[in-house]
Every structure is written in structure tokens, then in C-alpha cells.
Image (tube, coloured by chain):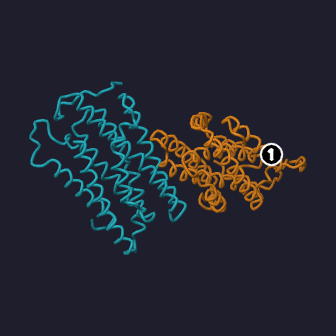
Chain colours: A orange, B cyan
Amino acid sequence: MQSTPSVPDEFPTSDPSSYRSFVLDLLGIMAYGELSAFERLSSDARFSPALADRVILGGRAVAEFSHYELIAAQLESMEANVAETMRPFMAAVDAFHDRTRPADWYESIMKAYVLDAISGDFYRALARHLDPQTQRIVAEVQVSEDQSTVLMNRLKEALMDNPRLASRLALWGRRLVGEALTQAQRVGIERSFLAGLISPSGTPGPDPVGKLFADLTREHSRRMNLLGLTA
Amino acid sequence: MQSTPSVPDEFPTSDPSSYRSFVLDLLGIMAYGELSAFERLSSDARFSPALADRVILGGRAVAEFSHYELIAAQLESMEANVAETMRPFMAAVDAFHDRTRPADWYESIMKAYVLDAISGDFYRALARHLDPQTQRIVAEVQVSEDQSTVLMNRLKEALMDNPRLASRLALWGRRLVGEALTQAQRVGIERSFLAGLISPSGTPGPDPVGKLFADLTREHSRRMNLLGLTA
């Protein structure tokens, strides 16, 4: 396998080394995100209301670990040091998790449901102008429809006839998305990470970053509506 | 697949329903043991000294979850309710973990190393007189040699030139094995679980349960010696 993918025409710069560092940043934040999601979800699983629910969250955690392994293998094939590539993103991801500790199992599955979806949208947007191999990894790391449906159905079931839980989880969903977008923006600025959004012509349209965040928010609202919650 | 395996000749009783309940007990305690090991190990992973070490413990945790899934599938094929089958063993397994909370990552991998081995020996001994299908599940649930070697090498590396850690981990190993045997004995008595050790002729030899515990202890000492520790 090639150790550095060639710069696709659609990317704003043709410099191979800045392209490589952009790809490494994207894979690094994804890898650390998956590894820490695995650890957090599996720790939360123990506090599930029923044994069957522990298995739902555990299975989801295991899927995150296999995503981590997929990204790590790609980084190794690019001759990058996996730990070094993740390191710049540890503080931001850890801070995000510390600020969004689920109070119980319901908040925990809500967090999994909301975050897997929004981070998937975010990574896909960043990968839009990247080489096919990187795009393939980003696509594979997405949680499958089936898995999301399991969480969504379990959440719907819990919310049915429980307006108190519904209002708590609606609030929780807003907090999660707020913290996620704040961290995404911070990391994006620190690592010039959002450069990949700018179109190659140099005419990025009115405001590509603003547009991304608006898209993410809109998709999040749509998913909350699926649960019968107001975003 | 058959929903109840037929009673093998070597089993002390020929009554199918007591044989079934013995097999369900064995699979139930194994399933809950794997599920809770998964949750504990993956939670501990986060406190690893280095990113690469988090991945070692995470990978081990994921292996435990796949063992859980294997046993659950077997229980389902026997038309047993997985959660109900695990329930009688929850208190004992949880109590064991509460009494053996690792103080740090080293104690955590030591716990994985010690416990996977001793519980493997225990389950194998109980399965000795069981039907081939149950024996196959017990064999598949064993942690592979490779995985144990990874932990052992990582422990050896940590212990090298660190006599203080060596004496702490030697003590910890003794505590782990003591607690594990205590719980095994308690569960064995409560659930008449050790009946499977008695040979079919009804002449179990001098003391089959005592012999099992002596074997478990001897094997544990051998593994401690491999690490250069006194058991």
C-alpha cells in the first residue's frame, strides 16, 4: 500500500505534505474518538436497567473498537505512528466526555445515538474532497443503519408514556450537540482542520464552515424529531 | 440444533433435567463472567499509562465480549433465556469484582492475566464429563495463547528492574486467587455446582473438590513463576 495517498484534484492545495497532514489529522481524531467512545460506552453499560440493555450498549462499544482498529491499520499502512497521530486530539475529546457525563443509562444511549450520527456527518463532510482510500475508511467507520435502529427503537420504547424522561433527554440532546459543535469548532481552528471544506477553486461559497455547522444542526434536529423530541 | 443435549455416560446422573440445569448453570456463570469482565476491563483501559496500553486492554475486553456472544448464542439454541440463566450468578461475580478493584493499570492487566487463566482451568474441569457441544463452547471461550502471551510480556516488561511493583503484584496475585477460589467454592455449594466433578461410578476418589482447588492453585503458582513472582 502507498504510504501517502496522492493529493486529489478537488483538494484546495496540491502540496503532498500538507495533504498528508490533513489526512493524518482526520484519521487521528477519528481514531481517538472511537477508542474513547469504546471505553466510555462499555463503562456505562454496567449501569443499564436490565441485563439485555447491558448487551445493547456493550455491542455498540465493541463496534467502536473495531472502527478504531480499522483506522489504526490505515495509519500503519501510511507509516504513521498511531499514538502520535491521536495525541493532538486527546485533550479535546477527553474534555468533551468530561463535560458530557451521562447521568444514567438513558443518557448514555442517547449520547451514543446522537454522537455517532453527528460525528459521522462531520467526518463525511471533511472527507468529501479526499482520496478514495480515505473516503472508504470514513465510510466504513460509520455505524450501520441497523445498529442505529436498535438504539432508536430502545429509546422510543423508553420515551413512550414517559414525558419526564422525554423532557430530560430533549435537554440532554441539546447539550450534547452544543458541546460537540463547540469542540469540533475548536479543534477545527487549532489544527486548521476545516481547510478541507474549502473548494479547490478557492471560491468556497459564502461560508463553508457556517454551512457545515448549519447542516449538522439540521440533521440533528431531524433525528430528534424521529424520537418525538424537540431539538 | 437440539434444545437439550443428551446426558453423556460419564455424568453422575442420567436425569436429563438435572443435566440440563447443570449445563445451564455452567453456561450462565461463564456468560455473566465474560460480560462483566468485558465491562470492567474496558473501563480500566482508560487509565493505562500509554495509549498503546489502552489498546492492549481494550482488545482483551473485546475478546471477552465475543465470548459472551458465543455463550449467549448457545443458550438461545438451547431455548434458554440468557438473562435468566445469568441472573443467579450476578451477585457473586459482582461481589468478586467489587472486592478486587484494581488500583491501577498494572493491577488491571494482572487481574486479566490471572483470572482468564484460572477461570479457564475451572470451567474446563467442570466440563470434563459434559457433552461434546458444551465442551466445545468451553474450549472456544478460552483466551488464546497469543493473547495471554501479549499480557505476560507486557507484565514482564513492567516488572523488569521494578522490585517494588513486583512485590505489589505478587501480593495482588495472591489476593486475586484467594477471592476467586472463595467465590468459586461459594457458588459451587449454592448451586450444587461441583456435582459435575464426581465421577459416574459414584466413587469420586478421595476428594474431587479438594483436588480441583489444589490443581487450580498449583497452575496459578506456575503462572506466577513465569512472571518471576512468588505465588
**Badge 1: chain ID:** A
Q: Nearer the viewer, residue B8 or A127?
A: B8
Percent x, y of residue B171: 32, 68
Quarter residue B137 falls in:
top left
Task: Describe residue A54's horizontal placement relative to residue A210 as left or right.
Answer: left
Quarter residue A142 falls in:
top right
Percent x, y of residue A99: 64, 58
Task: Describe residue B66's horizontal placement relative to residue A21 as left or right.
Answer: left
B5 w.r.t. A144: above or below: above
B218 w.r.t. A207: above or below: below
Given the current orientation, which residue lies at the most extreme top position?
B2
Q: What amino acid type is highlighted by mark number 1?
A: Ala
Q: Nearer the viewer, residue B111 or A131?
A: B111
Percent x, y of residue B174: 29, 64
Badge 1 density bin: few <14, some 14–19, many ≥20, Cα 10 Å:
few
Q: Which residue is mark 1?
A: A214
Q: Residue at x 71, y 36 (%)?
A: A225
Quarter residue A150 falls in:
top right
Number of numbered discs: 1
Task: Describe residue B35's horizontal placement relative to residue A37 as left or right.
Answer: left
Q: Nearer the viewer, residue B25 or B145?
A: B25
B66 w.r.t. B10: above or below: below
Percent x, y of residue B43: 49, 55
